[in-house]
Image (cartoon, rainbow, N blue to C red):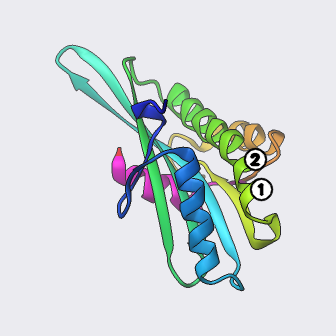
């Protein structure tokens, strides 16, 4: 049975299981099979106080982008009750994206030939601001797991799509 926090949300399709999301991604590619695609995973977080307790909303987004011709995305949210520490938030975001990738990449490969798309993990860190000292660490985590990493300003999957739902 699928748990509520295992579901991805689609702005057009509502709640979807991982298998249903893969089916939607495959269908999107099948609409224009000769185009090339980019599949992106990115996570973002937002801290807030609920009464006297600290809470962090983490959102992971999966985007299928038909280059120059539109995209669809899916997202899921997880709440954690803990104090917001920037380094911990960035590591958690990166680990959530990696966990999502490790779950869906085998399903994608079984459904869609890898020659149809590039796969990227977008990390919400950049050369400006307080996250600049963490770039090498989190990019190394992603690359060490066998994935392509993108950071700001090219990490729109995290800094725009996932951020929209935090």
Q: What is the x, y in percent for residue 163?
A: 40, 51
Left or right, residue 59 beside residue 144: left
Instruction: Tell me the SS state at disc 2.
Output: helix
Name the residue beneath numbered marker 1: 109
Q: How many numbered markers are drawn? A: 2
Left or right, residue 96 beside residue 46: right
Name the residue beneath numbered marker 2: 106
Task: Report the front residue among 123 and 42.
Answer: 42
Q: Is residue 120 above or below residue 44?
A: below
Mark 2, Cα crowd under 10 Å, few <14 / some 14-19 / many 20+, is few
Q: What is the x, y in percent for residue 142?
A: 74, 42
Task: Report the front residue among 165 and 82.
Answer: 165
For the residues labelled 2 and 1, the Cα–Cα distance comes to: 5 Å
Asked if residue 77 lies in the magenta stretch, the reply is: no
Magenta span of residues: 149-165
Name the residue rendered at 55%, 28% in the picture.
Answer: 87
Whether residue 162 can be seen here = yes
Instruction: Tell me the SS state at disc 1.
Output: helix
């Amino acid at each position: 049975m699928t748990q509520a926090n295992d579901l991805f949300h689609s702005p057009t399709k509502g709640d979807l299981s991982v298998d249903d999301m893969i089916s939607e991604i495959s269908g999107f590619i099948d609409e224009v099979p000769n185009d090339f695609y980019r599949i992106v995973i990115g996570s973002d977080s937002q801290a807030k106080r609920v009464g006297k307790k600290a809470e962090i909303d983490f959102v992971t987004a999966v985007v299928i982008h038909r280059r120059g011709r539109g995209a669809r995305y899916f997202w899921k949210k997880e709440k954690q009750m803990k104090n917001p520490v920037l380094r911990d938030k960035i590591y958690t975001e990166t680990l959530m994206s990696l966990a999502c990738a490790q779950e869906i990449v085998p399903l994608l490969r079984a459904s869609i030939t890898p020659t149809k798309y590039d796969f990227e993990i977008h990390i919400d860190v950049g050369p400006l601001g307080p996250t600049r000292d963490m770039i090498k660490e989190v990019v190394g985590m992603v690359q060490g797991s066998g994935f392509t990493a993108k950071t700001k300003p090219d990490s729109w999957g995290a800094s725009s799509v996932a951020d929209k739902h935090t």
